[in-house]
Image (cartoon, rainbow, N blue to C red):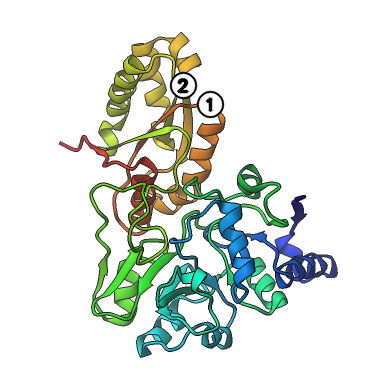
């Protein structure tokens, strides 16, 4: 299969040229094809959510197991009514405050949604994306779009069109390249049908924001201590209880205060280098620590090792959690591309979107971070 790459100019989305590009992609979707589209979270692999044969192509292209449900993307309350059977009154308040945006709501599905979309479960994950390209595509297609992340199953999520090409070139019909995604981590997944409401996957919409808007309690889903790589009997939501978002390299995580971080990284590097002397080690580093860490490594390990066996990646400013979130997946992919066999990374605090970053990093590493806070 030839995968067509279409460049989208966000600044001129209303132009005849861009409308023709959107219409071309929409025609592919109406015909049961697969289109990778940008969203404000990550790139999604979209198809007609009402067409079971089309949805099956998503699972084939991504090598995604059938027991893992996918999220449906809509452009209006009219389309919401088409894909859901009912919704709690609280949902309208959530929609008013967070849609369009990175919040997925688990709601009773309508008969129009194929069982494959929800993996046989009664609730369907639905969201209205804020990205204008995604909204334009849904409107042009005229159908709700099933759209999990546009990557091979379990791999690091795509925040650039090039990431989609790396994973799915030749396996899908079209990629809309509209540049980098705004948030860089997947949507928050919330079940509003129970009290307290339950967040299955943290994202850019935080627990605190939801509680403030609704004046209702919200709990976080408790992941198992060990994330299994085997199919679970039941997944209550996309992206829970599994090793996921993973680079090819082994990801080593640790926690420590920022002031102690350079020494902690140097210590972990020395341990990993002694155990794996032939491996190239990538270091995912906050911007403000790069000069100090470089000096420590050069003094302790020697310039030859630093040059040949270490790759430093500027992750972003440590106190700017949104910046870290945007750069996370792209940084992991970049270190993979550099040939790193091991990636060492600090885990940010759980404040705000930090909870989503920690969730993705833990699943990517499939292990608890080393605690160096004490």
Q: Is residue 23 left or right of residue 157?
A: right
Residue at 71 percent of width and 47 percent of height:
170
Q: Is residue 115 above or below residue 25?
A: below
Q: Is residue 243 above or below residue 186?
A: above
Q: CA distance from mark 2 to mark 1?
A: 7 Å
- Mark positioned earlier in the residue sequence (2 or 1): 2
**Label 1, residues with CA under 10 Å away: few <14, some 14-19, many ≥20:** some
Rendered image quadrant of residue 297: top left
Helix, strand or loop under label 2: loop
Do residues under tags 2 and 1 come within 8 Å of each other at their CB atoms? Answer: yes
Does any portion of residue 228 appear in the rendered image?
A: yes
Helix, strand or loop under label 1: loop
Q: Which mark is residue 323?
A: none
In the image, residue 105 lies at what x, y percent?
Answer: 42, 75
Q: Which residue is mark 1?
A: 339
Q: Which residue is mark 2?
A: 280
- Nearest the viewer among 344 and 126 is 126
In the image, residue 30 lies at what x, y percent?
Answer: 72, 73
Q: Is residue 249 above or below residue 96?
A: above
- Nearest the viewer among 298 and 63 is 63
In the image, residue 108 lies at what x, y percent?
Answer: 41, 82
């Amino acid at each position: 299969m030839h995968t067509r790459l279409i460049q989208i100019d966000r600044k001129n989305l209303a132009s005849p040229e861009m409308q023709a590009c959107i219409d071309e992609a929409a025609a592919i979707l109406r015909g049961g094809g697969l289109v990778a589209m940008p969203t404000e979270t990550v790139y999604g692999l979209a198809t007609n959510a009402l067409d079971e044969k089309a949805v099956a192509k998503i699972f084939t292209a991504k090598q995604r197991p059938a027991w893992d449900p996918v999220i449906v993307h809509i452009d209006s309350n009219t389309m919401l009514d088409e894909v859901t059977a009912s919704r709690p009154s609280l949902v309208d308040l959530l929609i008013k405050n967070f849609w369009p945006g990175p919040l997925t709501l688990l709601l009773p599905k309508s008969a129009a949604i194929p069982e494959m979309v929800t993996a046989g479960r009664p609730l369907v994950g639905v969201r209205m994306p804020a990205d204008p390209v995604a909204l334009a595509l849904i409107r042009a297609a005229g159908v709700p779009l099933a759209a999990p992340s546009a990557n091979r199953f379990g791999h690091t999520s795509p925040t650039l069109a090039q990431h989609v090409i790396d994973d799915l070139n030749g396996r899908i019909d079209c990629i809309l390249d509209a540049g980098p995604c705004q948030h860089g981590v997947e949507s928050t997944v919330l079940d509003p049908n129970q009290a307290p409401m339950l967040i299955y996957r943290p994202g850019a919409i935080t627990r605190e924001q939801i509680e403030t808007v609704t004046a209702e309690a919200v709990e976080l889903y408790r992941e198992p201590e060990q994330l299994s790589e085997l199919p679970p009997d039941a997944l209550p939501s996309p992206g829970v209880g599994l090793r996921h978002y993973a680079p090819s390299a082994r990801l080593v995580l640790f926690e420590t205060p920022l002031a102690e971080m350079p020494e902690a990284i140097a210590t972990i590097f020395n341990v990993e280098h002694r155990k794996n002397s032939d491996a190239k080690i990538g270091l995912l580093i906050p911007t403000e620590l790069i000069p100090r860490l470089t000096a420590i490594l050069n003094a302790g390990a020697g310039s030859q090792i630093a040059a040949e066996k270490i790759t430093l990646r500027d992750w972003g400013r440590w106190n700017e959690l949104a910046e870290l979130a945007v750069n996370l997946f792209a940084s992991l992919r970049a270190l993979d591309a550099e040939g790193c066999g091991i990636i060492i990374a600090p885990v940010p605090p759980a404040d705000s979107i930090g909870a989503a970053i920690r969730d993705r990093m833990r699943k990517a590493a499939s292990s608890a971070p080393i605690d160096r806070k004490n």
